Image (tube, grey):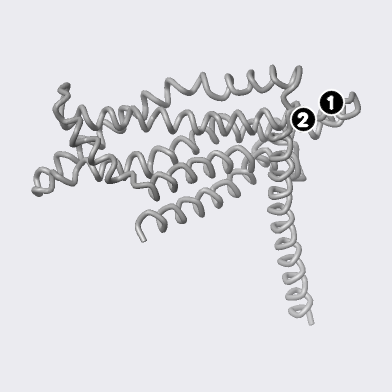
Amino acid sequence: MVSVVSWQRAVQDMGRAVLRWLAGWWHIVHFGALLLVLALSPSSYSGENRLVLARRIYIDTAPILGGFTVLCALVSLVLTRIVVVTALSYGLSQYALQLVIRVLVLELIPLTAALFVALRCTLPSGAELSQMRRRGELEALRQGGVDPLCREVLPRVLAGMFSTVTLAALSCVVALALAYLAVYGFVASGLPGYTRLFGQVFSPAVALIFVLKTLFFSLAVSLIPMASGLYDKADSSSRASAELRGLVRMFAVILLVEVASLVGNYY
């Protein structure tokens, strides 16, 4: 009898956990649709909201742009050198640059930029929103006639997306330039072959997948932490609880996007 009761309680607990999991993802989908409407509405960019948006974009992009670009340049230079030397030793030098472009530009840089922005900007912003919700600051804004989604949430989401795309785009340009210098040196004679190789790698389908993957990465690292900060009901007021839930959901979406892009590029 005791075992039957324990089994029933386990099933009930599992059912409640599944319902909470589904409710969490439904909140994210609903939250994303709501922010999409706000992002396309001209009234969201009037007056004080423009200043808040500009400030958030600067805070989430400028302090990390230089450091991330330098770090990406160093890693790109080291990886390029390793790939080129290894390809030469096996007599496969004609494939070295193509491998560098595919590994660095198509796969590693967008993923690294998204995770870097998430850890430095959007996850802490989501935890900050959770704290503001618990302290009643968002409700105070609403009672004062200010939409908290337009004033506090939308700028954070757009700033996270802008930061991710900016870091990925700049780092890709730096990686491509360093790959050329590592192989051809400071001469222009290799530009025709390099541009032809770049065009072979970035076919229209691959370029479209690359753009969509970067966009979805930026959406995942910007939207999910904010939704978790607004809707998750934590048992404690610690910032770590909101960050952890946002981190798990964010990694799940990033993994799905990465798998889908790999299937689209190589199958």
Q: Mark 1 highlights which residue?
A: 146
Q: Which mark is residue 132?
A: 2
Task: Name the residue type under label 1.
Answer: Val
Task: Name the residue type under label 2.
Answer: Met
Q: Earlier along the polypeptide chain: callout 1 or callout 2?
A: 2
Where residue 223 appears, as percent x and y from the top left, is 64, 40
Q: Secondary structure at mark 1?
A: loop
**Quarter of the rendering occupied by the C terminus:** bottom left
Which residue is drawn at the image coordinates 79% and 76% (left, top)?
5
Q: Is residue 81 left or right of residue 145?
A: left
Q: Which mark is residue 77?
A: none
Number of residues whose C-alpha sits closer than 10 Å to that of mark 1, classed few (under 14), some (14–19) or many (20 or more): some
Where residue 18 appears, as percent x and y from the top left, is 70, 63
Tell which residue pokes out farthest to the bottom in this image. 1
Which residue is drawn at the image coordinates 71% and 39% (left, top)?
35
Which residue is drawn at the image coordinates 43% and 39% (left, top)?
110
**Quarter of the rendering occupied by the N terminus:** bottom right
Is residue 85 placed above or below 125 in the rendered structure? below
Q: Nearer the viewer, residue 267 or 204?
A: 204
Q: Is residue 256 left or right of residue 93?
A: right
Q: Is residue 77 left or right of residue 131?
A: left
Q: Secondary structure at mark 2?
A: helix
Where residue 140 appears, as percent x and y from the top left, is 87, 27
Give the tally of numbered discs. Answer: 2
Q: Nearer the viewer, residue 127 or 266?
A: 266
Front of the two marks 1 and 2: 1
Pointers 1 and 2 in contact (C-beta within 8 Å): no
Which residue is drawn at the image coordinates 75% and 32% (left, top)?
131
What is the distance, in whole Å, between disc 1 and disc 2 at their CAs? 15 Å
Where residue 91 appears, as percent x and y from the top left, is 8, 48
